[in-house]
Amino acid sequence: MKAKLFLFSILAMLLFTSNQATAQNYLPFVSHTPVFDVTQRNLREVILDDGVYTLPVEYQSNSTSYERYTLNVKIQNDQITHIYFDNGGYLHRGSNNSGYTWSGGGIRWNVDYNGNIRSGIAKISIKYSGGRWQLFTIKL
């Protein structure tokens, strides 16, 4: 009985290890660099100098589908604080007399395993009285 149990154990071990080797031989090679979202709270320093940058902006609203622009945006302490339009108008963070509420604007940095910054993104939501809204996605 012990001999049968021993032989069964050896046979099971051989089958298990040969299946693992066979599965590993057929797995395709995939190169992948994971990217993680990091907020300014996780980083120890401000990444961008304060100033006005020309950046791609994706725009959506409840009255317009999806549009892309290149606009000037003001950045302070890695926060989008102003969006400047080509017609001279602008939106800004903080109190205003235009009847809108600004939310968002913090830049989320994408970094790899080594801590190298690959890209950044900021989303800003503008809500007006009466239910109108706008969404700006700014990519860095």
Image (cartoon, rainbow, N blue to C red):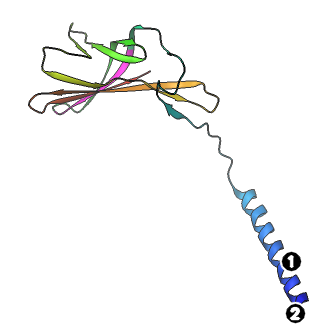
Q: Does 57 lie within the magenta span? A: yes
Residue at 55%, 35% (x, y): give it: 35
Which residues fall within the magenta stretch? 55-62
Vertical comparison of 137 with 79: above or below = below
Which is more N-terminal, label 1 or label 2?
2
Q: Locate residue 2 relative to residue 55 in the image: left or right.
A: right
Q: Which amino acid does label 2 sit on?
A: Met
Q: Does 20 lie within the magenta span? A: no
Q: Looking at the picture, how far across and down is residue 39, in whole percent?
A: 46, 28
User: Mostly what secondary structure, the magenta segment?
Assistant: strand
Q: Locate residue 57 relative to residue 112 in the image: left or right.
A: left
Local secondary structure at mark 2? loop
Residue highlighted by disc 2: 1
Q: Can you say which quadrant of the picture contains the C terminus?
A: top left
Residue 10 bears which disc, if any? 1
Local secondary structure at mark 1? helix
Cα separation between marks 2 and 1 = 14 Å
Task: Verify CB contact (< 8 Å) between mark 2 and mark 1.
Answer: no
Residue at 75%, 68% (x, y): give it: 19
Mark 2 neighbour density, 10 Å: few (under 14) some (14–19) many (20 or more): few
